[in-house]
Image (spheres, helix red, strand yellow):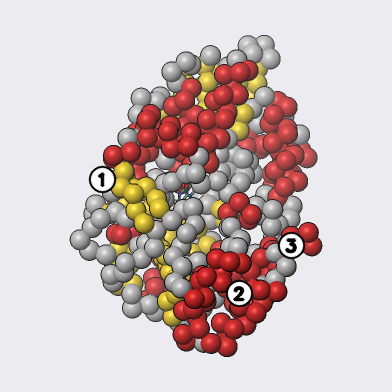
């Protein structure tokens, strides 16, 4: 079979790699390099993650086995301890905040007592939860929700948490059990979450992993997909009237794809237009030193929501930090915000992304499901963070590629 894959991000490359041993595979990518939002730009030997810091790990053994046995051997990765902090009330406290109440007590005992009181009476009963704001209050108590989770999420999603669905969050943010919460009040409790360790390529460039994924694949770079149609006569999918395939796999964003398909019903195109997403803007800085890998910033006064201390996972002599803000921000806006923080010394580079985050507003499930159903009905397979319109990290993109590979083996 000749298979066309639209997009050479992590999803397109992974499924391409899996299928290429049995099929003729061609990947169409509008940019001149592979990697999509995970790729980095080399800045004087520093991997500038133009769309946020990308580190790798997975709880899925099949994903780790695929990556380490087929793409980049485990010995070519460093295993790094995640060390995150939160800038909270002008202090630096440990991440996650629910285990940092002892630290809050040291500078604001009243607030710490209120957090504990509210946490302990929080129901953690999700039956009456209707939106993301309710979910935070119900899971962490009113004070932690109001002081941290709601302002931070308002900032990163650029939408009121009460206007957002909570369906997606359970998988992303584990609710701590009460015993662990109470232990943390007596003893320092370290970040024990599943992603506390992560892999980063030993040569300090995520692009090494991306290049290894892309190795041996036929990718047409600079190829912008603008039309998709099926020829009943030839039984082929035809892209831009130039490429012909027996089967196509889409990884392009669901809000765009319907408008590229010939004779796509208007109601599907309408649903696609309802899907919301956020761009992010990043700035690379020469910075002061820190032992942290990430710092989270819930305070509304700063447009940044996160600092990525890139030199701590990509070894370098000098210290570099990437600051991240939601939406399209100018160079000056980013530089001026950073200049208020003496930790950030010199702005070096700036980038505005395309799609970065799916916005889980209350409509997203309906629109997404309608489009996915339509694509399935016409025989287009779709995959990836924006191809499935979900909060997927790289490992889930790979997991979904493994699943699609199996499905295609069964079907064809
Ligand atoms: C800020 C941020 C931080 C993140 N950090 C991490 C992390 O630390 N660890 C982790 O595992 N994951 C992380 N992720 C998630 C990770 O980036 C994604 O899961 C993954 O990169 C998505 O890959 P994809 O192939 O599905 O999509 P994409 O990377 O979006 O790939 C789609 C490809 O399609 C191409 N394309 C689009 N339109 C067209 C067109 N018309 N014609 C041709 N080509 C087209 C694009 O150029 C792109 O190459 C992060 C994401 C963000 C936004």
Number of other residues with Cα within 10 Å of mark 3, as a class: few under 14, some 14 to 19, many 20 or more: few
Q: Nearer the viewer, mark 3 or mark 1?
A: 3
Pick the residue in front: 308 or 182.
Answer: 182
The location of residue 199, given as percent across then percent down, is 37, 47
Please state if 295 lies on the left or on the right of 108 as rendered: left
Residue occupying image coordinates x 52% and y 62%: 326
Badge number at residue 144? 2
Residue occupying image coordinates x 56% and y 24%: 406
The answer to which of marks 1 and 2 sits earlier in the sequence is 2
Occupied quadrant, residue 231: top right
Pick the residue in front: 389 or 279.
Answer: 389
The answer to which of marks 2 and 3 sits earlier in the sequence is 3
The count of marks equals 3
Please state if 411 lies on the left or on the right of 331 as rendered: right
Residue under circle 1?
203
Residue under circle 3?
125
The answer to which of marks 3 and 1 sits earlier in the sequence is 3
Quarter of the rendering occupied by the C terminus = top right
Q: Farthest residue in the top direction?
A: 233
> Is the residue under label 2 in contact with that under label 1 (CB below 8 Å)?
no
The location of residue 130, given as percent across then percent down, is 76, 61
Number of other residues with Cα within 10 Å of mark 2, as a class: few under 14, some 14 to 19, many 20 or more: many
The location of residue 19, given as percent across then percent down, is 48, 22
Vertical order, 31 against 134 (above or below): above
Mark pair 3, 1: CA separation:
46 Å
Q: Nearer the viewer, mark 1 or mark 2?
A: 2
Mark pair 1, 2: CA separation:
40 Å
> Is the residue under label 1 in contact with that under label 3 (CB below 8 Å)?
no
Number of other residues with Cα within 10 Å of mark 1, as a class: few under 14, some 14 to 19, many 20 or more: few
């Amino acid at each position: 079979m000749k298979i066309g894959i639209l997009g050479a991000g992590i999803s397109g490359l992974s499924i391409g790699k899996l299928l290429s041993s049995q099929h003729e595979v061609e990947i169409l990518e509008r940019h001149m390099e592979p990697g999509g939002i995970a790729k980095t730009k080399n800045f004087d030997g520093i991997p500038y993650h133009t769309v946020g810091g990308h580190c790798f790990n997975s709880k899925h053994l099949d994903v780790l086995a695929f990556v380490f046995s087929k793409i980049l051997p485990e010995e070519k990765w460093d295993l790094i301890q995640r060390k995150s902090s939160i800038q909270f009330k002008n202090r630096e406290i440990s991440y996650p905040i629910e285990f940092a109440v002892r630290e809050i007590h040291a500078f604001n005992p009243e607030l710490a007592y209120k957090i504990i009181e509210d946490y302990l009476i929080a129901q953690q009963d999700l039956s009456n939860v209707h939106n993301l704001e309710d979910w935070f209050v119900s899971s962490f108590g009113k004070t932690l929700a109001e002081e941290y989770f709601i302002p931070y999420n308002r900032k990163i999603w650029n939408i009121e948490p009460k206007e957002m669905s909570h369906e997606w969050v359970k998988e992303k943010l584990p609710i701590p059990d009460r015993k662990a919460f109470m232990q943390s009040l007596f003893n320092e409790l370290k970040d024990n979450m599943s992603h506390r360790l992560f892999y980063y390529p030993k040569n300090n460039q995520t692009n090494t992993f991306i290049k290894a994924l892309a190795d041996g694949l036929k990718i047409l770079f600079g190829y912008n997909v603008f039309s998709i149609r099926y020829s009943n006569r030839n039984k082929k999918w035809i892209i831009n009237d130039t490429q012909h395939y027996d089967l196509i796999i889409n990884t392009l964003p669901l809000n765009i794809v319907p408008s590229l398909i010939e004779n796509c019903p208007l109601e599907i195109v309408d649903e696609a237009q309802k899907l919301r997403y956020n761009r992010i803007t990043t700035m690379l800085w020469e910075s002061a030193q820190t032992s942290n890998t990430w710092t989270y910033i819930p305070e509304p006064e700063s447009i940044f929501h996160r600092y990525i201390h890139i030199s701590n996972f990509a070894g370098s002599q000098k210290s570099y930090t990437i600051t991240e803000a939601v939406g399209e921000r100018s160079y000056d806006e980013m530089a001026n915000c950073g200049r208020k923080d003496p930790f950030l010394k010199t702005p070096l580079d700036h980038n505005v992304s395309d799609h970065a985050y799916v916005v889980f507003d209350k409509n997203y499930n309906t629109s997404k499901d309608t489009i996915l159903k339509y694509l399935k009905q016409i025989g287009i397979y779709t995959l990836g963070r924006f191809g499935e319109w979900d909060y997927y990290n790289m490992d889930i993109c790979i997991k979904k590629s493994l699943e699609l590979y199996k499905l295609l083996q069964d079907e064809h």
